[in-house]
Amino acid sequence: MLSRVRFRRLPGRLSFVSHFHTSYPSWAKVHKTFKLADIGEGITECEVIRWSVNPPDSIAAFDALCEVQSDKASVEITSPFDGTVKELLVKEGEVARVGSGLCIIEVDEEVAVSLEEDAPSASQQNNASSGLQPSEAKPKEQTPFPTKRRPHPLDPNISPEQQLLLLGRNHANVLATPSVRHFAKQKDVELSLLVPGSGKAGRIEKRDIEAYLQIGISATNTNSATSTTSKDDPAEDAIVEFGRTRWNMYRAMTKSLEIPHFGYSTSLDLTVLHEILPIINSHIPRHYLPTSLHPPHTPAFSPSAIYPQPASPDVPSSGHYTKLTYLPILLKTLSKAMLEWPLFRSSITPSTSTSDKPTLTVRPNADISIALSTPTGLYTPTLQRIPSGLTPAEMPKRGGTVTVSNVGGIGAGEGASPVLVPGTGIAIVAIGRAKWIWDVDRGDGSGERRLKVNVSWSADHRVVEGAELVAFIESWRSWVEHPQRLIAEGV
Amino acid sequence: MLRACVFSTWRSHSRKRGLSTAANNTLSPHHSIYVSNSSNPYFNLSLEDWLFRHKNHKEPLLLIYRDVPCVVIGRNQNPWKEVNMVASRTTGVPWIRRRSGGGTVYHDLGNTNFSIHLPRSSFDRHATAQVVLRAVRSLGVDANINDRNDICVGKDKVSGSAYKIVNNRAYHHGTMLISTRLDVLGDLLRSNKPTMETRGVASVRSPVCNLQQYEPSVSHEGFVEAVIDSFRQEYNIEDSTHTVEENVNTLGIDYIHKGMEELPRWDWAFGQTPEFTYNISRTFDWGTVTARIRSKHGIILNCSFELPDGHQSISDDLVQDQSRQLEGQRYGFLDETKEGIQRMMEGPGAEIWQWLKMEMDT
């Protein structure tokens, strides 16, 4: 990922920053009131029929807590937390209103001590950039951190938006037929985000859901980020909230301070590829072409004259393309190098205990993540074995071991220092923009015009040695600069 | 030619949506449409609960079943209030407490039960009611849904509904009166205890009628098909229908087996009764006695007596003793082997005692 802050991650360098946030966990016993959440269907109160626990029983998340009844519905409520039951606030036979407390549970909570310190201080920044755990500074304030678990749907402490996403309640103003609701549920789409739909009286139709899936993420995040600026006087400072993806990037980058990076830049000679590309593009197999570009009439002499050709594979429309660019070829050659280098197919095994010696998990295939900068933010979906045309639903959840950022598409950059984030693999490369240069080393001494592209790598120095990275890059180069080797694969 | 066409259409229809029975294999909870061939209410309720807890919580499921005559009360109801115990005993029609909320219904083979299971987040009782409503309308009955989400024809209820909601799953189940013995229904559900006040849910009495009264051609089989079709359409289900037999295999499923055992046990049937009070009076030769019984979870918490002024045959001490003896006893199931109770039954307070026992047995 391209770092937009002027942080350089080489050891020993000073960093300039005015505020520096770190956090480390500590534990505290907290009393949480579990409130009767909205059961839905317009129900405002329930009678508590039966408690399955009594103080001071201990209880685990999702253990049966109590049963309530409303109207004709009998509802089983489970505990949202692990902890000890401290007090029952509503007796059996009594009525509890939605939103009022049902019981109090004592919970062990991870509380992140958020530390703030002002002004740069050279020694402390050095500590940070050498990649060790951020050093302690005087704690100024204590902020509770949300627990890492996915919140229980009835946890009253989660925000309404989160609860909506978890429970997906059908609001009265969300109009949709039951089959549309079911389709939305199948596709994991929150209907209230699509209001109003394109149907009669604002009804949400199936096509609205499909269109929504195409876009990917709702635009509400970007709206929230820009909404506060419009009202303010242009001469004054405006406070803008972090959109969701930018906030995730913020947190991920903060975590990336744990990783000692080192960098290495070189350029790859694309001249041979440049000559090959047009030939490849004029011979794209028919099944990869969009149907609109299929030749309108069959040729006069067809190879299928005496016997039908084997049926071409069925490629979904997301897999169609009209022109191959350098990036797919660079990815393919990178995957070839990764197959030769098990180290670059590995990632640090996620482990729950930090005291165990870490291990590397080597994958049999090359998984590469691509950095995607979209209107709503920065994402890194993962390609496995570089197939063509993935839809969001098909993207694997696990990050790749190597990440590629094609910033050359955006600007004529010549160098970059991409940043690794835990979970994005052990190395990252930023690919610049290819340009023609005069290479004096080639030719008969007078030089030659060559197409070169700059590639800047950063790698996790806990796992990768400098020499290993250089050697790996040379393997990659040998595929990129001699693509004829790919023919040997076919033969 | 015509016959061959019809035949082949029938064949393909049944191939696509054929019936399959888990005769020799263990029953799987992963199908989408189940029709139970058992008419044992204990089995059917336990089967329903098993499917509810074991099916993939994101997928819709439909179960249809019929029971031999029985009365089914809601999870949090008071059986003494809802069921005419005397009629139940004389007719031999048992009553059963189910696991979903709601009121009391009467089942017999003229009544078909449906049960629609869905993920909690997309569960909407109105939508599920519509699925069944469409099925009924497709049979030619001009039915509609009232504001309590029950299916009616005109002012008469033809169906009662109840719901159960857990963490990630919910179901709407209900009855459908096709050709039920409404006279038997009336007797069993008429318990007539106006002075019994319960904390739990009381049944909302409504006039009922059978679908056959409006459309004589309606049958159990026709209704089953119509509900299955409506369900398939609504949730895009292509799975074939599975029939369930009550046999060695299905009875061997531990969860079902345990459920069937639990239902008739005192702890579930009576022990789940919410708190209630019962005020009764009786005039004896010597005066009128009023008793106030308070019970919770099927146990008598206390029983206080009011005796007529200037009574002589019954002493206050005796009455106090009777109160004490009743405390902690199971309502309706006095432990007559207990010495203290035997004393009551024979002593001067025997009349009172007999009267109380009779009241509790009703």
Image (cartoon, coloured by chain):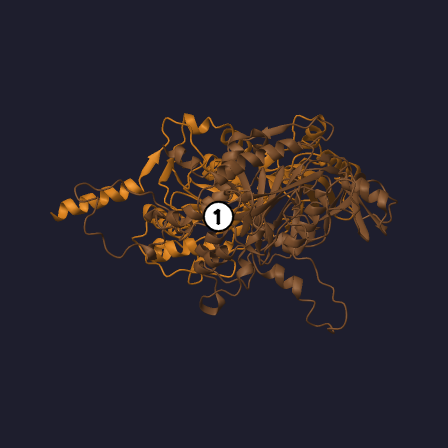
* Identity of the residue drawn at 36% across and 48% down: A284
Residue A147 visible (yes or no):
no
Q: Name the residue nearer the viewer: A69 or A137.
A: A137
User: On screen, B211 above or below A131?
Assistant: below
Left/right of residue B342 with respect to residue A20 in the rendered view: left
Residue B305 visible: yes
According to the picture, the residue beneath numbered tag 1 turns out to be: A326
Give the chain of mark 1: A
Residue occupying the point 54% across, 40% down:
A368
Disc 1 residue type (three-letter) = Tyr
Where is B21 relative to A248, above or below?
Answer: above
Front-most of B138 and B332? B138
Q: Give residue A167's position: percent from left, percent from top.
A: 59, 51
Chain with colour orange in the figure: B
> Looking at the picture, does residue B69 appear above or below residue B344?
below
Pick whichever, A489 or A247, lies toward us: A489
- Quadrant where the image shows the C terminus of chain B: top right
Q: Position of residue A456 (x, y in %)?
A: 62, 44
Q: Residues within 10 Å of mark 1 (few under 14, many from 20)?
A: some
Q: Quadrant of residue B18?
A: top left
Side of A415 relative to B226 (left or right): right
Where is residue B143 shown, x and y percent of the image?
40, 60
In the rendered image, residue A240, in percent from the top left (x then y), is placed at 71, 62
Q: Which chain is brown?
A: A
**Residue drawn at (58%, 34%), measured in percent from left and top?**
A472
Instruction: In the displayed orientation, state which residue is furthest to the front.
Output: A445
